[in-house]
Image: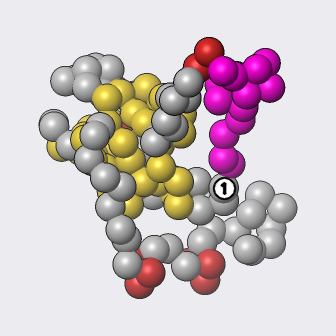
Amino acid sequence: MLSIPCPECGPRDEIEFHYGGQAHIAYPEDPHALDDRGWAEYLFYRDNPKGLFAERWQHAAGCRKWFNALRNTWTYEFTATYRVGEPRPDIPAEELPSAATSPSSPTGGTL
């Protein structure tokens, strides 16, 4: 089972959490000026990288607070968690998972 480090409660099992999508999505400055395409981009268009990604999570079965996390979408590894409102932490390149240590793809190949 995956362990997620809550900034308030510490590491807990993944079943205690709810995923909330991409972190750091700014509300439009003038929402009345947006056309349908602008609203669609704000509501539905999100990044989908293979690698480090900033996400929102809620500790639903614990403190019930929302927080942000940096998670590798390829390895599922959580690199950092931080409270909402705090800036995204800078992760040195040597701490990032490398392609050489990434697991094989489901088709048997590597990155």
Query: Residue 46: in sight, yes or no?
Result: yes
Question: Left or right: where does residue 102 sit relative to residue 58?
Answer: right
Q: Nearer the viewer, residue 15 or 66?
A: 66
Above or below: residue 100 compared with residue 5: below
Give residue 26's position: percent from left, percent from top: 49, 36
Q: Nearer the viewer, residue 71 or 47?
A: 47
Give residue 73's position: percent from left, percent from top: 58, 54
Furthest-top residue in this view: 32
Figure quadrant of the C terminus:
bottom right
Question: Left or right: where does residue 36 sit relative to residue 91?
Answer: right
Query: Which residue does the image show at 66% across and 21% down from the upper left?
Result: 33
Residue 38 is covered by the magenta coloring: yes
State which region is magenta: 33-48
Residue at mark 1? 49
Q: Nearer the viewer, residue 86 or 10?
A: 86
Question: Left or right: where does residue 94 sit relative to residue 105?
Answer: left
Give residue 19's position: percent from left, percent from top: 48, 30
Furthest-left residue in this view: 9
Residue 80 is covered by the magenta coloring: no
Query: Which residue does the image show at 55% across and 79% down from the upper left?
Result: 98
Give residue 64's position: percent from left, percent from top: 25, 20
